[in-house]
Image (spheres, rainbow, N blue to C red):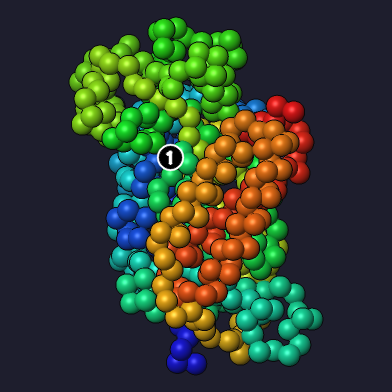
Amino acid sequence: MSDFIQTDVLIVGLGIAGGVCAYELAKKGLDITVILKNTVEDDGSTHYAQGGIVYFGENDSSEKIYNDIIQAGAGVNNPEAVRVVSTEGPSIVKKILIDEIGVEFFRDVNGTLEFTEEGAHSVKRIIFSGDKTGKAIISKLIDKLKTFNNVKILDNHVAIDLITWQFNSRDRLRMYRDKTCLGAYVLDTKLGKVKNVLSKVTVLATGGMGRIYLHSTNPDVATGDGYAMAYRIGVEIINMEYTQFHPTTLYHPLKRNFLISESVRGEGGIIVNSKGERFLFKYDPRGELAPRDIVTRGIISELTETKAECVFLDATKVGSRDKLKDRFPTIFSTLESIGIDMSKDLIPIVPAFHFQCGGIKTDTYGKTSVKRLFAIGEVACTGLHGANRLASTSLLEGVVFGYRTAQFIFENIDKSMFKEFPDVIPWVDTGEEFPDPVLVKQDWDYVRNVMWNYVGPVRTRRRLKRALSDLKNLLNGIESFYRDVKVNRDIIELRNGAQTGFIVALSAWSNRESIGSHYRID
């Protein structure tokens, strides 16, 4: 089997969820292989997460956290997942992030953790590291992982498809077995070579799907790979209509879709229209601190009513120039680079896609409907977020379920079901030429416009019907295109993005109830 690489655990993706899972398994001595599309310096949404992570604030309790998550999620959350996160979350954050890897969260002069406020939280409970909390966490995690000899991190590697007993083995009786994942076909994008990676356990930690939308806060790697790969092998996927749009992204040609953290509003920033008027109280008594879906729709309604291109975030009352520069260094410097002084000037903003609340259905140990396949982080759906994610719970989700999944894997990996491997068919490239980049770009533009215009923050029956028709036709063409060319990252991502768009549109079409971040006006 010289053409194959074997490992105990294959983790696809290295954000906070994949990182915590790898770290916990590495401590226990398992052989871990982690693949990521870019490099450890810039891969995944965790690197760009600004706001913070939920912890225990003053006069806080697990019950308060539980209730806030349920309320933000419109009451369709999975109670068990919310209970796990609200009761275990803060202690796991302390154990791993604070005590073990030493993330430098902001503290006051006495060394006490500082807290900030964000929308829909009943108390101030968000701990943070300036406006680059995600970077502070993932950098420490990666530094720890590099100290383990049993962890192999392969950057510039893209998963093409999951290897399953049913679809990729030579077992003549494979149709009688339960669906079982055996690893993945992985493209080394530097060498242009496909590696056949077999694993006792495969963990999808591939993150989100924001790049399938015209406007998104997500990095370029977020092309829906995990959802699409799972869908193709028949994994159960739920709640994909619950697509959260962030209300405050920069509207400027030089810095398109740059995220302005919710913490700016938590610290006292307000949103005004082109006349300088606050308007969000028309839509919710919490104004700027209402859940994101409400703020987003309020902005869209105001833009429609006023026929303006954007609204404005006013942070001038948050504090002095020095305070803003200290509290939000990345945001401040980014705005300053394009001529905006947030201590004096209004910041032009529009909504953009931010987070997928649904995903691959899992239990609270990351188990999917396919044996030996786990999913954690944004690509997974435990039901924690319901119809709308509460601010600063995404990093918390990654820590909690990365940790719990690692514990489950370690306790069960010696069972016989994880040790069986049939004769697996190696990867065969069917194309002779690389895909034409002009065709790839055109198809991507089509996907992104369809998703934004028809499956965006406000939906109708006719828009969704058109989206399904258009995406299905496009998918057929892309699948033919994919099989006719040599595999590379461009065609892999396009195939996955179009597939994920279709999944979202189908979920939105199937759910006629307007709830949370899924908003239908008919």
Q: Nearer the viewer, residue 418 or 445?
A: 445
- Counting labels gives 1
User: In the rendered view, would you say 57 is above or below 383?
Assistant: above
Residue 69 placement: quadrant? top right
Locate residue 2, reporting x and y percent: 45, 92
Q: Residue at the location (26% across, 28% down)?
A: 335
Instruction: Evaluate whether residue 435 shows in this view.
Output: yes
* Residue tagged 1: 217
Q: Residue at the location (59% across, 86% down)?
A: 424
User: In the rendered view, would you say 224 is above or below 261?
Assistant: below
Judge from the rendering whether residue 519 lies leftward or rightward of residue 440; answer left or right.
right
Judge from the rendering whether residue 36 lies leftward or rightward of residue 343; answer left or right.
right
Judge from the rendering whether residue 264 lies leftward or rightward of residue 442; answer left or right.
left
Q: Specify the amino acid type for callout 1.
A: Thr
Locate residue 6, reporting x and y percent: 48, 82
Residue 36 placement: quadrant? bottom left
